[in-house]
Structures are given as structure tokens and as C-alpha cells.
Amino acid sequence: MSNNNGQKLAGKIAVITGGNSGMGLATAKRLVEEGAHVVITGRREKELAEAAAFIGRNVTTVAGDVSNLEDLDRLYAVVKEKHGHIDILFANAGGGKVAPLATATEAHFDTIFDINVKGLFFAVQKALPLFKDGGSIILTSSNANVLGVPAFTAYAASKAAVRSFARGWTMELKDRKIRVNSMSPGPIETLALEKAGLTVEQAEQAASQFASQVPLGRRGKPEEIAAVVVFLASDESSYITGVDLAVDGGMAQV
Amino acid sequence: MSNNNGQKLAGKVAVITGGSTGIGLTTAQRFVDEGAYVFITGRRQVELEKARALIGKNVTIVQADAANLDDLDRVAAAVRAEKDVVDIIVANAGFVEQVPIDTLTPEHFDKTFNLNARGPVFLVQKLLPLMSRGGSIILVSSAMHVMGIPGHTTYAATKAALRSYARTWAAEFQDRGIRVNTLSPGVTDTPILDSQVTTPEERESLVNRYLSMIPIGRLARAEEIANAALFLASDQSSYMTGADLMNDGGVGQV
């Protein structure tokens, strides 16, 4: 074990997009427990304030939308001012919406790709000037990147793009010793389904259907995703780069 | 952090084949540091005794050929007699010999498949009755299972077989609460490299050929693979099953 009571990320500076709820929030809390200072961003001020209270210490919040490049500039201006550099980026903001191909609108497609692909692309680009050589970038993809999911095709394709970024950026950032990996959750106990436009009943039905498709027989907990992000963020994964790590209870593996 | 001074495998019993050198030995040392009791197997008694001295405590050595089913019965019997339970299996024993298809012999084929692909099936089968709920099986595959590198017809195919076992068993073990994943190292600086060459010059030439392909620009250290084995063995990966953890410096990703 290292010093600092076994903390794996003592003194590290971490930026988490979509850090105000679900997996992002659980990860922010866990990173702080491991000794990091976190800067979290999300669109809703109220949720951000609640998230900061939940995390308790060593957290800075910046309200913003990752698909808005000016908001990203503001985010990194705050990071620069407060910490001067970044060690860890968890590019996690994203989402899906139900839309069958036959009726999906241009606005649907653009919204999904603006947040999940364009927003993530520029969240990483704009972090680079502040990034410490030897740092770790973790991109939230989804096990949908290898699945056929009806009515979520734009979402699945956007997550396949994210998986691809990890490959290309591994090459582009190798001389700076920055590792880039994607992490692909399966069904996790968050409000993602409700946010995707499902009613509470539909979401419950989908959740129980997921459980039957998952070898581990249940949805994952946000804390289980956080544990994996700690692994990818820390030196425990020092030889791992360019991979896509499925954390999906086996759903897309069988 | 958990109790026991933050040890992640406190009180767990692990079986590691090919545990006297390289990745297997380093993993055994790491597991014992984290509170586990380990059974290590290997063919050579002298190497096993050296490994036992290095590990120092909480270790039993069992001289066994991981390709020989009678030997695997003895491994299971030793575990049953001493602990009557197993929590973690690391199927790690492996063999590589570079041979082009033109000169590949049936003996070479059988030797590689018997140890790398057939042995792990019966290792797991024989230990399964002793395995507890919440157990974790780690099959040491290789990044080569997704690559095409001349001379590796049998080796790469056996490693692909392991990746496939993880999928099937993740589904088969659904009701047993046992997780199974593959760990796929890239080129690791261990004695398995020496086994493929006869002179220091040949070793250097082999290493240089690999280095040109590896984004991270160096070989893996056995400790880095052991870190990932610990991750998969512990509750830190509690929502992962059927997955493949590539630990390859990016060589199979780009």
C-alpha cells in the first residue's frame, strides 16, 4: 500500500463531466475518498449544489453544458484558476433518448451526437493544455457500443464513436504518457431510463428485463462503476491504454 | 476502505497455476500481501521451493503439470485437504513456441493446446465444487487473441479459446454467484520471453520487434499484470463478468 492511509489518488486533480448525478456523482465521491480534488460539471445548478453537499469536501462545481464549447472554456478556466493542472479526466456526461429509426427527428440525432460525441471530443481537447503528462483519461461509453438496441441506434452509434476515440487518442497522446480508456457500463441503477423518456412503469419493466439478460442477474450500482474508474484513474492500471472495459454484469459478453 | 488495514483479499483462498515464475509468481506475492492464502502450482519442484521462499507466508506449493488431469486432481485434493474452499482461481500456466505453419508439428499443436486451452477447462471443473459464492475466476489470455502475428497459430488460438470460455462460463455460473473474466496481458518482461530465444541478442531483437508495435513504448512489468489480477479477484470489479481486461500497453487496441 502507498502512504496517505492507502489512498490511491492523494493530491490528484480530477475533472468529471456529468458529475452531478448517477455514475459521475458516485465516482466524484469515491475519488475524493481516495484523496483527489474534483471539479464536477453539470447543467443544473440545483443538482450541482446538492452533489457538492453529498461529496462534502474537496469539490468545486461549474454549471455548464458539455455540448456548448463556451461552457467548456469556462469550466477549464475555473480548473486553471483553482488548481493549475489536471491529472484525471472522467468524460462522463451523456445520455440517450428513445427514438425508433422510422420516426427519429434531425433534432434527436443532433442532440445525442452533440452531447455524447462532440461534447466529449471537445471536453478532452480543451483539457489537454492543462493535462499533466502521465495522467489518465476515462471516457464513458456503453455496452450498447457492441449491441443492437432498438430505438437507441443514435445512442449506440455515439457510444461506438467514444470507444473509437480511446483508440485514436491513445496514439495521439502516447508521447505525453497520457493513458486513454473507454469504460462501458451495462444497466446501472440511475435515472438514465427515465431521462431517456420512459415512464416510471416502462423504466421498471426495462430494468427487470435487463436483470434477466444480465448473467449477474441484477443492475449494477453507481458505486461499482466508481470502483472501476478508480482503477483506470490510478497507477494500478499503468499498462492499460486504448481499451474498452465492459462493466456490464456480462450483458454484452455472452 | 475495508478493515484489515485495507487488505482487499483478507481471508480469501486462491489457486494460481504456473505460480513459480513470472506473472503467476508476482500475482501470488500480491495476493498474499493483500491477505490471501495461495496455492501455487508448477512443474519444477526447485522453482516452486524458490517461489515459496520469496512469497514467505500463507502459501502451499503443489508440484503439478497444468496439462495433466491426474495432476489437477492432486491440486484439487490438496486444496480440499488444507482449506476445503477456494475463492479465486487464476488459470495462468501457459506455453508459447513460435512456429510457422509450414513446419508446425502435431506435437507442437498438442503441447500448446493441452496446456493453454485444455488444462484450464479441467482445472476449473475440478475446483468448482470447492468454490464459494462471490468467487472470481481469472483466465490469463493474451492481447494476441485479437491479433495476427506470424508464428503464433496455436498460441493465439488457445488464448482466443480462453476468452471464449469466459463468455460461456459467465452465463453458466449465473446462479452460482461466481464471476469469470479473462485478463489479457501484452508483452510482459518475464521468463516466457527467455523461453523463446537462445541468446541475449535474439532476446533484444524479439523485444525490439514488439516495442515498435506498443503505443505505451515499453514492455509490461509483471507487477502491472498482478495489479489487474487483483482488481479482477477483488470486489473492486464486482459488476464485471464475461469481460476481457486488456492489459497490453495498447498493442492490441490501435
Image: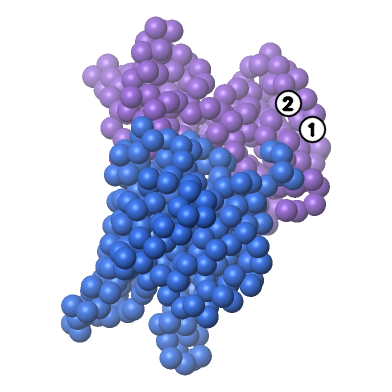
Circle 1 SS class: loop
Mark 2 to mark 1 CA distance (whole Å): 8 Å
Q: Position of residue B113 (x, y in %)?
A: 27, 68
Q: Residues within 10 Å of mark 1 (few under 14, many from 20)?
A: some
Q: Residue at x 66, y 56 (%)?
A: B33
Q: Is residue A68 above or below residue B50?
A: above
Chain letter, colour blue: B
Q: Which mark is residue A58?
A: 1
Q: Residues within 10 Å of mark 2 (few under 14, many from 20)?
A: many
Q: Chain A: what color? A: purple
Q: Position of residue B90 (x, y in %)?
A: 46, 56
In the picture of the structure, the residue carrying the numbered disc 2 is A55
Q: Which mark is residue B41?
A: none
Q: Is residue A44 above or below residue A70?
A: above
**Residue B119 visible here:** yes
Image quadrant assignment for residue B144: bottom left
Front residue (pair B48, A67): B48
Q: For the N terminus of chain B, give its image quadrant.
A: top right
Image quadrant assignment for residue B97: bottom left
**Residue B217 visible here:** no
Badge 2 sits on which subunit? Answer: A
Circle 2 SS class: helix
